[in-house]
Image (cartoon, rainbow, N blue to C red):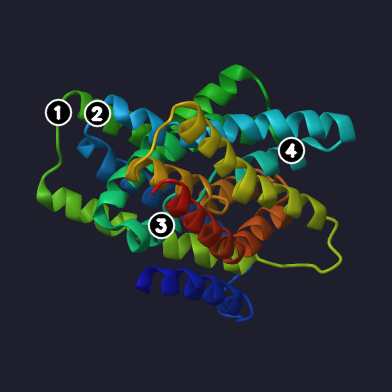
Amino acid sequence: MSSIILLFLCLFIGLGIKRLPNFPKNTHVVLNQFVLFISLPAMALYHLPEIKLSWDLLFPASVAYIGFLFAALLFIPLGKYFGWSNKLIGCLLLTAGLGNTSFVGIPVIQALYGDEGIKTLIIVDIPGTVVVLSSLGMLTAMSYSKGEKSFKLILIILIKFPPFIAFLVGLAMLMLNIHFTTEIKDVLGKLMATVSPLALVSVGFQLKIERRSKHWKFLALGLFYCLFIWPMFCFLIYCLGFKQDGLPIKVSIMEAAMPPMITGAIVAVQYGLKPRLANMMIGVGIPLSFLTMAIWYVFLEWYLK
């Protein structure tokens, strides 16, 4: 419960401090850079070397890939048909196509399913969401922004992206069965703990919901995909297609029902992909998701008894 309170508190702090002259207008830029270069790599290094590999991990690990793939299959053709700008398509892919599997996911899954649920969440988040963000997400950001689109440059920037570097290091440690000492893990854990508050304060700082904004219809479309279509795809594939059930499947579908990923929105903002829409996806999506997640939870408890 305290994590959920912190979530909303940080959003309101961000909204509040932007009205204070003590905080410069580029405060969110500094916060975003700290999250991308320090906090997120620490999270990957903290969890990845401890994962226990098995075939059962394929279902939770594939949640993020399913979400991003279907987002691309939906938004790219729609964008071409209706003549949307590349920035709009890129923004929808990075927000609606990436779920908030850790910042919101951790307190929600902990409250609903306890420590056993967190074990599945880590598989959804690190080899799933973090890897998709660090690879496909960054490729999307660079391809749909105004910057250079050569594959060589995209690859160079991707390799230099700190969360992706951390993923490669963590994966190597996992394969070689190397683990950090307790002291180093404690340090990584403390750095990792800064992800949620800093990212949420940054989003709150940038949030500006315009009643007459031209983004409302795209906001509705993006959130409908993220909160309903994506988890429905996972339900159809896992439960009806592969006849799976149990706690890991419940957690996987609930993770698919999370609101848009904060870090995905940060990347969209950093690359100039409709920053206002990106922040509205977070600012509106997070509160709304608590209603839609309750619906999904009741449905899954009824169907997967």
Q: Which residue is mark 3?
A: 195
Q: Which residue is mark 4?
A: 89
Q: Which residue is mark 1?
A: 177
Nearest-to-viewer mark from 4 and 2: 2
Residue at mark 4 to residue at mark 2: CA–CA distance:
35 Å
- Three-letter residue code for mark 3: Val
- Considering the numbered disc 2 on the image, is that residue within a helix, a strand or a loop? loop
* Local crowd size for mark 2, using a 10 Å CA cut-off: few (<14), some (14–19), many (≥20): few
Mark sitting earlier along the chain (4/2): 2
In the displayed structure, would residue 200 be above or below residue 53? below
Q: Which residue is mark 2?
A: 53
- Name the residue nearer the viewer: 47 or 243: 243
Q: Mark number for residue 240?
A: none
- Considering the numbered disc 3 on the image, is that residue within a helix, a strand or a loop? helix
In the displayed structure, would residue 176 be above or below residue 254? above
Mark sitting earlier along the chain (3/2): 2
- Seen at 76% across and 42% down, the residue is 88
